Image: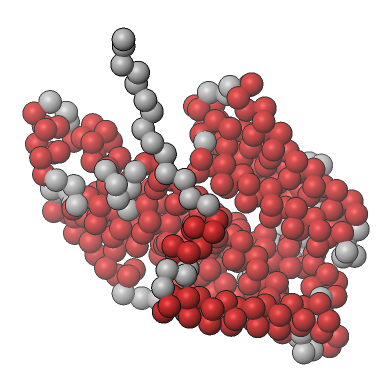
């Protein structure tokens, strides 16, 4: 008689047992749970009553175009929709190819566009814009479902994302003498400008910060001194100072025929500021790496470049994912500071709307809407970070 191999036992727990174990495990726990639940119910009832009976949401719906795209010409807004369609398709395909982390971003992107479609349906923008947003939300899931069948290689997706950057910029800004008329960056605003500032800041600051961290640990004194001086100088001043310098002082150091628009200067200031903090996060990951890893790489005959690319950076960057994602979430929220140099991002547009005579007294509605937008974006980033940490085993191995 042969022994039968049994599967390991599985522990199951029902909702009632979970509640008893976590929320009502004893008298103190039950009292605390009851008090907290009562407070939350009262708050929810008060907020729900205000939102359904007293709030003036027409202030938001009437000015929704301003909140989303600022003063971008309405007859050219189809270019933004086309950009969003391209990014939705790439996000869906990436979610199908790369798995958990990008799937969270895909779900968040689709849900966010559904939210905007619902708001647009009751705004003066009309049903056409709402249908376009619904189509974009559907394209994300078409990419997710079609991805396994198409089986696009990872390298091809990476090339597609890199190619999407210039395509997006061309669609946004346009070119003279083409069917795409030039739309100056001074007309960009609202949520569009907020996302652009945050995206450029993250994409540029991350590789720059990694290079600064490696330079600070370099064996060449000149490189180490320059990188250290840059990091310490940038971290010693607030972002507001960097933005003022980029907006006011930078033009004095440029030749007379060279003009950099205000949005580009703000993007550069945010990216340079964030890079210094990324460098310190990465340096912490580099210092946490055991010296035996470097010794093993040298014993295998790897040169400095190979050691950093294949041994050092993969482990260091993996360990600092939580710190860097927290930094990027802060960067997204810090984009509201560009209003001090005359740029109208999401919160700046909200303040401008409150200055309208028919919007007086609607501060709660406008700030609640902008707060909801920021919450959705930040929550999506944090959840993607948790999934990435879980997939890479950060803190467990």
Does residue 104 appear to the left or right of 171 in the view shown? left
Quarter of the image that includes the C terminus: top left
Residue 15 image position (x, y, % from top left): 55, 56
Does residue 169 appear to the left or right of 200 in the view shown? right
Residue placed most toward the observer, 4 or 339: 4
The answer, for residue 347, to whether it is visible in the render is yes
Single out the residue that lies furthest toward the front: 1
Residue placed most toward the observer, 253 or 138: 138
Q: Residue at x 62, y 28 (%)?
A: 147
Q: Is residue 193 above or below residue 148?
A: below
The answer, for residue 271, to whether it is visible in the render is no
Q: Based on the displayed image, in which of its 4 quarters is residue 345 positioned?
A: bottom right
Q: Residue at x 11, y 44 (%)?
A: 291
Residue 346 image position (x, y, % from top left): 66, 69
Colour setup of the view? secondary structure
Q: Residue at x 53, y 82 (%)?
A: 35
Does residue 282 appear to the left or right of 112 in the view shown? left
Quarter of the image that includes the N terminus: top left
Q: Residue at x 34, y 61 (%)?
A: 276
Residue placed most toward the observer, 258 or 120: 120
Residue 264 image position (x, y, % from top left): 56, 59
Single out the residue that lies furthest toward the top: 1
Residue 135 image position (x, y, % from top left): 80, 43
Residue placed most toward the observer, 133 or 243: 133
Q: Is residue 279 above or below residue 124?
A: above
Q: Is residue 173 above or below residue 243?
A: above
Label total for image: 0
């Amino acid at each position: 008689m042969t022994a039968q191999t049994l599967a390991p036992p599985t522990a199951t727990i029902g909702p009632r047992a979970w509640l008893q174990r976590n929320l009502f495990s004893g008298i103190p726990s039950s009292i605390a749970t009851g008090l907290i639940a009562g407070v939350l119910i009262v708050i929810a009832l008060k907020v729900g009553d205000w939102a359904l009976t007293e709030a003036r949401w027409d202030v938001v719906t009437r000015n929704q175009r301003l909140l989303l795209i600022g003063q971008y010409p309405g007859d050219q807004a189809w270019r933004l929709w086309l950009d969003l369609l391209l990014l939705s398709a790439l996000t869906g395909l990436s979610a199908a190819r790369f798995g958990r982390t990008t799937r969270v971003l895909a779900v968040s992107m689709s849900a966010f566009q559904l939210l905007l479609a619902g708001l647009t349906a009751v705004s003066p923008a009309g049903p056409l814009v709402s249908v376009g947003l619904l189509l974009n939300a559907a394209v994300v899931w078409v990419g997710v479902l079609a991805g396994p069948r198409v089986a696009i290689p990872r390298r091809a997706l990476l090339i597609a994302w890199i190619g999407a950057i210039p395509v997006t910029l061309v669609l946004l800004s346009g070119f003279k003498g083409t069917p795409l008329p030039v739309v100056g960056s001074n007309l960009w605003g609202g949520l569009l400008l907020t996302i652009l500032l945050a995206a450029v800041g993250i994409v540029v600051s991350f590789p720059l910060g990694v290079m600064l961290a490696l330079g600070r640990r370099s064996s060449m004194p000149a490189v180490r001194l320059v990188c250290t001086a840059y990091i310490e100088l940038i971290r010693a001043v607030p972002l507001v100072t960097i933005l003022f310098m980029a907006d006011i002082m930078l033009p004095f150091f440029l030749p007379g025929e060279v003009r950099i628009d205000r949005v580009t200067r703000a993007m550069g200031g945010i990216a340079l500021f964030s890079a210094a903090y990324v460098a310190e996060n990465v340096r912490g990951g580099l210092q946490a790496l055991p010296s035996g890893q470097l010794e093993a790489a040298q014993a295998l005959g790897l040169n400095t470049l190979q050691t950093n690319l294949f041994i050092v950076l993969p482990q260091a960057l993996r360990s600092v994912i939580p710190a860097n994602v927290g930094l990027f979430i802060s960067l997204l929220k810090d984009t509201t500071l560009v209003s001090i140099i005359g740029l109208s991002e999401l919160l700046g547009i909200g303040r401008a709307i409150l200055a309208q005579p028919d919007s007086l007294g609607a501060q709660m509605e406008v700030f609640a809407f902008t707060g909801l937008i920021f919450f959705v974006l930040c929550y999506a980033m944090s959840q993607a970070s948790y999934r990435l940490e879980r997939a890479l085993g950060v803190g467990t191995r």
